[in-house]
Amino acid sequence: MKSVIIEDEISNSDRLTKLLQRTASQIKVIATLESIEDSVEWFRSNDMPDLIFMDVQLSDGLCFEIFNFITIDTPIIFTTAYDEYAINAFKVNSVDYLLKPISTVELERAIEKFHKYFSNNNSGSLLNLFKDMQENKPIYKTRFLVKQRQTLVSFAASEVALFIVSSQIVNMYTMDGKKFIMDSFLDDLEKSLDPKIFFRASRQCLININSILNLKNYPGARLQIIVKPDINAEIIVSREKVTALKKWLSQ
């Protein structure tokens, strides 16, 4: 069984190759690619492998750009240090989504899933996979990795008070009042977070239920949300969203 690894860090690709040798000796790595450009060129010149291991963040961009140039029907096991791209990964033919550092147990489970759903002898395998995915609870983002000067800081989603757009920039405020600039769109953040905890109060604001202090009536049958911490900005809920907000708060 032939496989290709797409990974821009040699140490990671070497480690994955060794893990495969120990846990799935039937899978042979026939190529290791380091970028979107390398991958597109390789796939245009070679037959598709049986399985692809694909890092999300490559040296020249996100791996999803590869699909803009090449049609890939091969099952893919995504590997990454971040969990924020899981939703995009499952929009393509993803077997699994593994967070680095990849453990032997996680890799074995992913390969078992590959054999279960994508084996040539298993008719209707893709349909069964999608059925299983629908029956399972959705996986929501639980942590954020953000830049703070020259360092990276990790926060649990529960520590986030709200996200708010200002001058086309998405800002994240933590419960203790810290502010960080996010490299994400508000629409994507909304899809990745548990809707029982986060509510899209407006086009500019996505808010954690635990950050709400109270509501105030606002002209035009609207509501104003008073939050902690004080972000020195009004959060106004439109008349059309008031009913949904009240229902969300009383769930």
Image: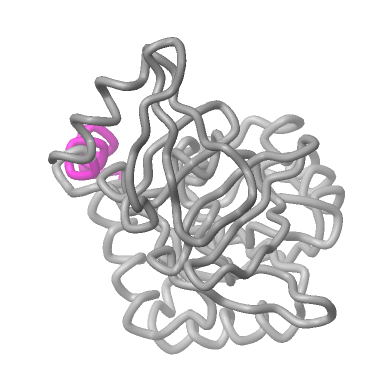
Instruction: Assign the magenta stretch its main secondary structure.
Output: helix
Q: Nearer the viewer, residue 173 or 109?
A: 173
Q: Is residue 19 above or below residue 143?
A: below
Report x, y in % for residue 140: 36, 53
Q: Nearer the viewer, residue 119 or 58?
A: 58
Q: Residue at x 39, y 13 (%)?
A: 239
Give residue 214's position: percent from left, percent from top: 32, 46
Q: Is residue 186 magenta?
A: no
Any part of residue 84 in sight: yes
Image point (79%, 43%), residue name: 40
Left or right of residue 131: residue 187:
right
Q: Residue at x 63, y 62 (%)?
A: 55
| Location of residue 137 with respect to 173 vertically, above or below | above
Residue 15 image offset from top left, x and y in percent: 60, 86
**Is any atom of residue 1 visible in this view?**
no
Answer with the quarter of the image where residue 71 lies: top right
Quadrant of image for the C terminus: top left
What colouring method underlies this structural image? one colour
The quadrant holding residue 146 is bottom right
Q: Residue at x 18, y 36 (%)?
A: 131
Left/right placement of residue 43 relative to residue 127 reads right
Q: How many marks?
A: 0
Q: Residue 49 location, x and y as percent?
A: 57, 51
Start-end of magenta stretch: 120-133
Residue 123 is a magenta residue: yes
User: Residue 57 or 208: which is nearer the viewer?
Assistant: 208
